[in-house]
Image (cartoon, grey):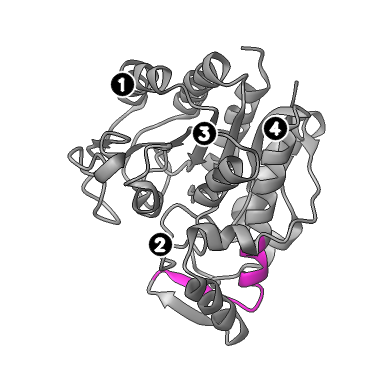
């Protein structure tokens, strides 16, 4: 089956400021790389008309939805020192969520096998009650609940390879065994969470797996973690759909971190995740953009990732 792309020019309208690293140029770099390689023409470009507010409310407190809307109306406004909104940020954040829901519909209808969602603002730092770390709403968490409650899936695997720990996603699902959260991340580093001892709580104990890595970690270590630690745990869990919080800021050229991952590393990680999806859930896989702040490295890394999505398993 074909691979899909979620992208909309409205995502460019979220403007946290001229010098902010999470800028519209990130998506421009991705689209340029996909078009220059010819991959954009091979992707199915999704359209949608979802109003995602009811699904945002499945994950976030209603007060947060209202807070982001009011902050956008009063923009420019800062929700925390790193998270700034403009007048179009609320609309862009809702549209980002809506795009991921369209990806779910396409995958569940078997129109597509995998989808890459080139959305912004990112989401994995957003907790149920607060936006933080460049993130307004937690796109992946909302997508997981949509797959479960709208499409009737039971178990969701979220693989977060962003260089920063996805504290928001972990926070939302830490007591829920129906979502297995796996994260590799530089540690100790922002936001300060993600120790190996954080494995979930209550009924969700054992369904969070953190692999904190030191600064300077390279492809070989990441690949070993994916092959030797993630793969057996994921195959034992047997998810009904696989989601990736696809941050590309562990790249060696990224200015906000200190890792040494290359495009080849992201390519191999993608292959492992595709193997999980092919074995467990009829190839159902949705990747949602998170970080990545060197524009050239981001474009190259996404192009390598999408190329692997397009390859036969």
Distance from the alpha carbon under mark 2 to that under mark 4: 29 Å
Going by the picture, which residue comes out furthest to the left?
A: 197
Distance from the alpha carbon under mark 3 to that under mark 1: 23 Å
Q: Please tell me whether mark 3 or mark 1 is closer to you in this view.
A: 3
| Secondary structure state at the residue bearing disc 3 | loop
The magenta span reads 82-94
Residue shown at 75% from the left, 58% from the top: 9
| Labels 3 and 4 touching (C-beta < 8 A) | no
Task: Residue 129: give its label.
Answer: none
| Labels 1 and 2 touching (C-beta < 8 A) | no
Q: Is residue 254 left or right of residue 9?
A: left
| Secondary structure state at the residue bearing disc 1 | helix
| Secondary structure state at the residue bearing disc 2 | loop
Residue shown at 34% from the left, 53% from the top: 171
Task: Work out whether residue 279 or residue 61 is closer to the camera in this orientation and state it.
Answer: 61
| Secondary structure state at the residue bearing disc 4 | helix
Residue denoted by label 3: 154
* Among the two numbered marks 3 and 1 on one chain, the one whose residue lies closer to the N terminus: 3
Residue denoted by label 2: 133
Q: Please tell me whether mark 3 or mark 4 is closer to you in this view.
A: 3
> Are there few (<14), some (14-19), or many (20+) residues within 10 Å of tag 4?
many
* Among the two numbered marks 3 and 4 on one chain, the one whose residue lies closer to the N terminus: 4
Q: Is residue 112 above or below residue 81?
A: above
User: Where is residue 206, by image quadrant?
Assistant: top left
Residue 89 falls inside the magenta stretch: yes
Residue shown at 66% from the left, 64% from the top: 92
Residue denoted by label 4: 107
Quadrant of the rendering where the C terminus is positioned: top right
Residue 79 falls inside the magenta stretch: no
Residue 68 location, x and y as percent?
Answer: 54, 75
Task: Work out whether residue 306 or residue 55 is closer to the camera in this orientation and state it.
Answer: 55
Task: Residue 229: give its label.
Answer: 1
């Amino acid at each position: 089956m074909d691979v899909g792309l979620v992208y909309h020019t409205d995502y460019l309208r979220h403007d946290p400021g001229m010098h902010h690293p999470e800028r519209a140029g990130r998506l421009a770099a991705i689209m340029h790389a996909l078009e220059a390689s010819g991959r954009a023409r091979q992707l199915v470009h999704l359209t949608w008309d979802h109003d995602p507010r009811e699904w945002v409310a499945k994950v976030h407190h209603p007060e947060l939805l209202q807070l982001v809307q009011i902050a956008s109306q009063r923009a420019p406004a800062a929700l925390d020192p790193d998270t700034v909104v403009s007048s179009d940020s609320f609309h862009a954040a809702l549209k980002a969520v809506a795009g991921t829901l369209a990806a779910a519909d396409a995958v569940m209808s078997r129109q597509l096998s995998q989808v890459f969602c080139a959305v912004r603002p990112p989401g994995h730092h957003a907790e149920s009650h607060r936006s933080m770390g460049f993130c307004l709403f937690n796109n992946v968490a909302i997508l997981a609940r949509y797959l479960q409650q709208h499409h009737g899936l039971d178990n969701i695997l979220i693989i977060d390879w962003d260089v920063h720990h996805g504290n928001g996603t972990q926070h939302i699902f830490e007591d829920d065994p129906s979502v297995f959260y796996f994260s590799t991340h530089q540690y100790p580093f922002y936001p300060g969470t993600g120790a190996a001892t954080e494995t979930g709580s209550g009924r969700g104990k054992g369904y969070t797996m953190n692999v904190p890595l030191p600064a300077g970690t390279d492809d070989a270590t990441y690949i070993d973690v994916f092959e030797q630690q993630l793969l057996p745990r994921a195959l034992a869990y047997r998810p009904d759909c696989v989601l990736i919080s696809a941050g590309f800021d562990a790249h060696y050229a990224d200015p906000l971190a200190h890792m040494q991952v290359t495009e080849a590393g992201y390519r191999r990680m993608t292959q492992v995740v595709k193997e999980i999806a092919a074995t467990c859930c009829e190839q159902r896989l949705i990747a949602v953009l998170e970080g990545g702040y060197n524009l050239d490295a981001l474009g190259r890394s996404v192009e390598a990732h999408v190329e692997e999505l397009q390859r036969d398993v």
